[in-house]
Amino acid sequence: MDDEDKKIQTGSGEITPRPMSSGGIGNGGGGGSITSDELKKILQAQPTVRYSRLPSQSVPVSRPVADTIEQEKKRIENEGLRQNINLKRKTLWILFWFLAAETALIFLLAFFQGFTAWHFHLEEWSFKLLVTATISQITVMLFVAVKHLFPSH
Amino acid sequence: MEKGKIYEEAEKIAQKYNPDSISPFPYEKVQEEHKDLAIIFSDKLPEGISGAIFYNKENSSEAQNGAEVASSIETKQEPNFIILISTQKPFTRQHFTIAHELGHYFLHQDIIKSEESIVDGEGSLDGSKMLFRLDNAEYSRVETEANNFAAALIMPTALVIKAWKTLKSIEEVAKVFNVSPSAMSIRLEKLGLIG
């Protein structure tokens, strides 16, 4: 290769790279290497540029770091709130089905008690205790759930 | 050069070209002022190469002074420092590599001029694996200085501390500065924010 061939047109001037073995430091580590010919091809393929920007598809929006920190802080807080709401919703749903099942069971017992079906019979005091306890439990649980879902602050 | 002076130099340059602390770093403003510098993006660099900086003797001011100039338009200074960045790497890597190569440009012009180029692979950027032409210690020093410069340029101390105190997650803070979590964890470690 003569000297003229070694000159590389970059669009904004010429560059004459020496082979990395005789000029240039570091060949990248990390398993990569570059030869004079490869370098020549790479630079020849570049458009004429005074300065350039990163390929647009890979560049995130430029904005002040301080704004991004605030935005991220709010995003994390919102994310936390969203997770909290989802967890509440799930808990409430489980609670609802539990109370529904409990109510159905008490209704069934009251039905059996009323019609003495299959010779089912509870002492009056224990039946009253069961019904009162269930109604109290449902009332308290609903109160706690509503208070937690809609806190006064 | 001492680490403290490198940080000082990098933050001075950051203040000059990026007073609003924008991320990604608006390196094109550096190019606008430094007419001897060109940053070129290429998808043709070999896989292990993240970036490189070359000194183009043909375009140097000494060479231009000796050359006959045909018209006034051509008297503008051509870039004689060319930074080549691999677009095959993720954006965070490209962002850090540009800052690293700018570190070479601002700190090691004499070495670049004498060696004609510095080629940086993933190994030299994270400091784990290097191949040398300069002696080991010299090359290691040059790369470490460029890494420290890059870190201070795109991850300024005050903002990193603020972000860390607010977000408390390496991944989240890395996202804010458009760097990889590993680059951010090194920066946080050097600032004594993580163990």
Image (cartoon, coloured by chain):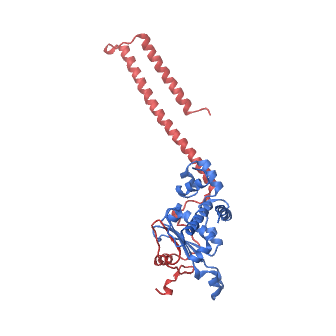
The front one of B41 and B125 is B125
Q: Judge left or right: residue A102 versus residue B141.
A: left
User: What x and y, as percent, mark residue B157?
Assistant: 64, 56
Q: Judge left or right: residue B12 versus residue A99.
A: right
* Relative height, residue B19 to residue A26 (above, below): above
The image quadrant that residue B13 belongs to is: bottom right
Answer yes or no: is residue B37 visible.
no
Q: Residue at x 54, y 45 (%)?
A: A79
Q: Residue at x 53, y 62 (%)?
A: B127
* Relative height, residue A72 to residue A57 (above, below): above
Q: Residue at x 49, y 22 (%)?
A: A137
Q: Which chain is blue?
A: B
Query: What residue occupies the far left of the structure in this picture?
Result: A118
Answer yes or no: is residue B147 visible.
yes
Give the colour of chain A.
Answer: red
User: What x and y, as percent, mark residue A114?
Assistant: 38, 14
Label tally: 0
The quadrant of the rendering that contains the N terminus of chain B is bottom right
User: What x and y, as percent, mark residue B183?
Assistant: 55, 58
The front one of A116 and A137 is A137
User: What x and y, as percent, mark residue A46?
Assistant: 51, 75
The image quadrant that residue B77 belongs to is: bottom right
Q: Judge left or right: residue B121 versus residue B150.
A: left
The front one of B11 and A66 is B11
* Relative height, residue A81 to residue B9 (above, below): above
